[in-house]
Image (tube, rainbow, N blue to C red):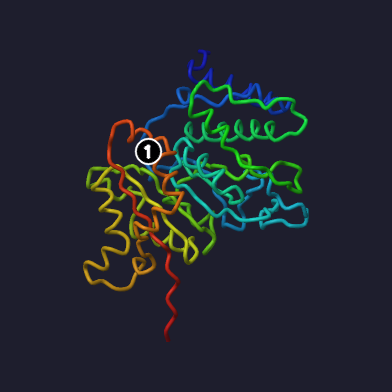
Amino acid sequence: MSAPPPKRQKREQYIKRAAAAARKETPGNVKLPQKKFYRQRAHANPFSDHQLDYPLSPAHMDWSSHYPAYVNPDPKQMNLAGSRKLLKDVEVVDIGCGFGGLLVGLAPLLPETLMLGMEIRTQVMEYVRNRVQALRIQQKKLQTPESAAPSTPTEPTADAEAEAASGSAPTPDPSGLVAGGYQNISALRSNTMKFFPNFFRRHQLSKIFICFPDPHFKAKKHKARIISENLNAEYAYALRPGGLLYTITDVEEYHHWVLRHFREEGERQGVEGGVKDLFERVSEEELANDPCVEVMREATEEGKKVTRNKGNKYVAVFRRKADPEWTA
């Protein structure tokens, strides 16, 4: 039997070291994962059968393993699948989270808000999980009073050092773990186009982020775009009134696609009714005062790459309007 590929072998060695460090609670020995061991094709066919696990309904979803610091201490508080409930619901979702840059950037900005990244690519999702685990261990050590000297990330990059230094102040939690310190972010592998309503109930979310999605340039591939009339209806279902849907892309044609599939298309064509009437575009003045927009621009891996290449970034944010009243 042949040996595993070097990339996979090195990745497995990292995972073993991270697990051993977690058991010994020695965060100083934990290194942030390196992307070169987790590279994967940039595109994934959303219509393929990826053998994904998904809950029967949002009431069946087990979130306890994703946010252990927020598990309800009452053992009688169980969901329909028999798993422990959380003290609060997931409110922010990053669709197509990539390598998790947005989640890590938002974690200290919204320390008490549970945020989830959804990604379909296997190795990319494995990287995000290992990254979150390493950051949690490091921050737990930094916030431990008994530690003689705070340990710092051993990743030899400026981005990694900045990420480790940006943890928020911890708050006590009944579970015994430290809230804040990246305990409020997690990620799972899923196909948003197929299973988004299986994870989130009506009006559960306050923010949805869609950052630098696959543009699918060919016309015959437009059906695979993550923004469409059908998918926008699902986003409107999960967003609460007043909730925000953030979009950013470096492709101008895709930006106009986004605008056409939200409120502006209906206004321009004089069309009334439908899901477009549930969104209104947020003004530029309001976006200038929203710190999440700056994180979306600069914290994601794609955003950094566009900045390096001196490209353009097109931002559009839409607010979920209140549901119209039923008329007899």
Whether residue 90 is situated above or below residue 308 in the rendered picture: below
Whether residue 283 is situated above or below residue 307 in the rendered picture: below
Whether residue 156 is situated above or below residue 64 in the rendered picture: above
Instruction: Please name the residue shown 52% across and 28% down the image.
Output: 160
Lateral position of residue 251 relative to residue 83, left or right = left
Quarter placement of the C terminus: bottom left
Lateral position of residue 151 relative to residue 268, left or right = right
Q: Nearer the viewer, residue 235 or 182?
A: 182
Q: Which residue is mark 1?
A: 303
Crowd class of label 1 (few under 14; some 14 to 19; many from 20; radius 10 Å): many
Amino acid carrying label 1: it is: Gly
Instruction: Please name the residue shown 76% across and 49% down the image.
Output: 174
Lateral position of residue 196 relative to residue 55, left or right = left
The x and y percentages for residue 104 are 52, 39
The x and y percentages for residue 215 are 30, 43
The x and y percentages for residue 131 are 55, 32
The x and y percentages for residue 190 are 49, 45
Q: Secondary structure at mark 1?
A: helix
